[in-house]
Amino acid sequence: MAILVEHISQLLTMAGSDIPRSGVEKDALGLLRDGAVLVDGRTIVAAGPRERVLDHALAARAERLSAGHRVVTPGFVDAHTHPVFAAPRLDDFEARLSGDDYRSIAARGGGILQTVRGVRGASEADLAADLRRRAFEFLAAGSTTIEAKSGYGLDLDNELKILRAIKTAAERGPLEIVATLLGAHAVPPELAGRKDDYLARVCEEMIPRAAAQGLARFVDAFCDDGYFTPADLERVAEAGAKAGLGLKAHVEQLSRTGGLAAAVRRGAVSVDHLDHATPQDFAALAGGRTVACLVPGSNYFLAKPYPPARALLDAGASVALATDFNPGTCPCLDMRLILSISCTQMRLSPAEALVAATINGAHAAGLGGTHGSLEPGKRADLVCHDAEDYRELAYWFGSPRTHWTMKSGKVVYRAP
């Protein structure tokens, strides 16, 4: 049965061009007062002024769903997460509070490698069950689609185990999950000092197997000082392209290596973090299809300077926001907190932040044609927020603000 969503104080459709939003579209919300959305099955068939939507042939017999004069937006698309892990990294957290940094923690076996040990010791069933539980937390926070990376296995069997856990959770729904193989996350301890040998395994074994089994849509690499180089990123990108997988990339986070330029040359859908990006990098992104995917929750948690969001937008780059949810550097899966951080710490406007968290997040996950805006033909992913004005979504923080969440035409979460 069709569903008519009505009694909306502000409807943010994000209607616009079919490319990542930048320039004059960087804050274009497609805002309508007293709007409505008509859904048939998994798809939006009409969205706009209520009286016009009511004229649609399906509207008369549609089930009515009231927003209670609240704000309705597209579901958030969280385009950068690491949600498959066995335990939090509480020792790392305490060590940082005592003054240790990312590299010193990693050097003594903490950081990524601590999570690797936990994942290697966990069963696939337990990893999938944990992700299923987290999936409902994402939905309760208004995220209807996430990108999920592997990267905590660092050998063939365990990387595939993580990707299978992601696939299991995605198939059981209702959260939609786009899988990324991040084999080039770090060099495993058993191959310490043999980065090239490990990278060969990533490119010659992991990527072809993951692609052949339909376990990933993208490949990714942590291109930074002490991890992988731009040349390594090029190898991963080439192997991914040969296997039919797209590219995302962790770049310019801990230092500037030139990884951003390499990723853009390779047609990456997104370049992520960018804490140390420069004006030269901004120019490489301006007006292009590669999205700058910023994860300021990590900067907050690590007490690090924030990425240059304002400069990127002003230079004409398209910007997405994501949580970077992971057990070590951002144990936060709530995009609403990321909206607030982006406004207060990176000086985005509430409108720019919402564009970044919806339609540009969709483009950063390779889904811009089907997700991220409320337009006919697109996926019926809607969130009714407990707010009358969209600016409240970045203003109120630290408390639940989701009234209900609809995924693919079904209400999958309601506030208690």
Image (cartoon, rainbow, N blue to C red):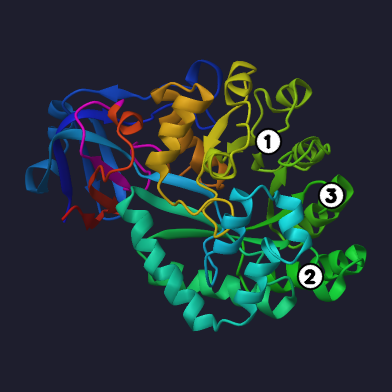
Image: 171 above or below 35: below
Residue 188 is tagged as 2
Residue 45, quarter of picture: top left
Residue 158 is tagged as none
Find the magenta span and give its range: 373-391
With 269 as the anchor, is 166 left or right in this view? Answer: left
**How many numbered marks have been drawn onto this rendered protein structure?**
3
Front residue of 86 and 140: 86
Residue 101 visible? The answer is: yes
Residue 89 visible? The answer is: no
With 265 as the anchor, is 217 left or right in this view? Answer: left
Spatial CA span between label 1 and label 3? 18 Å
Please state which amino acid type lies under the numbered disc 1.
Leu
Instruction: Assess disc 2: are there few (<14), some (14-19) or many (≥20) residues with their C-alpha within 10 Å of its C-alpha.
Output: many
Residue 375, quarter of picture: top left
Percent x, y for residue 106?
A: 74, 59
Instruction: Assess disc 3: are there few (<14), some (14-19) or many (≥20) residues with their C-alpha within 10 Å of its C-alpha.
Output: some
Q: Residue at x 17, y 36 (%)?
A: 56
Spatial CA span between label 3 and label 2? 20 Å
Image: 176 above or below 192: above
Percent x, y for residue 285?
A: 69, 28
Please state which amino acid type lies under the numbered disc 3.
Glu
Helix, strand or loop at mark 1: loop
Residue 274 is tagged as 1
> Which residue carries the number 3 mark?
234
State yes or no: residue 384 in magenta. Answer: yes
The mark nearer the N terminus, 1 or 2, is 2
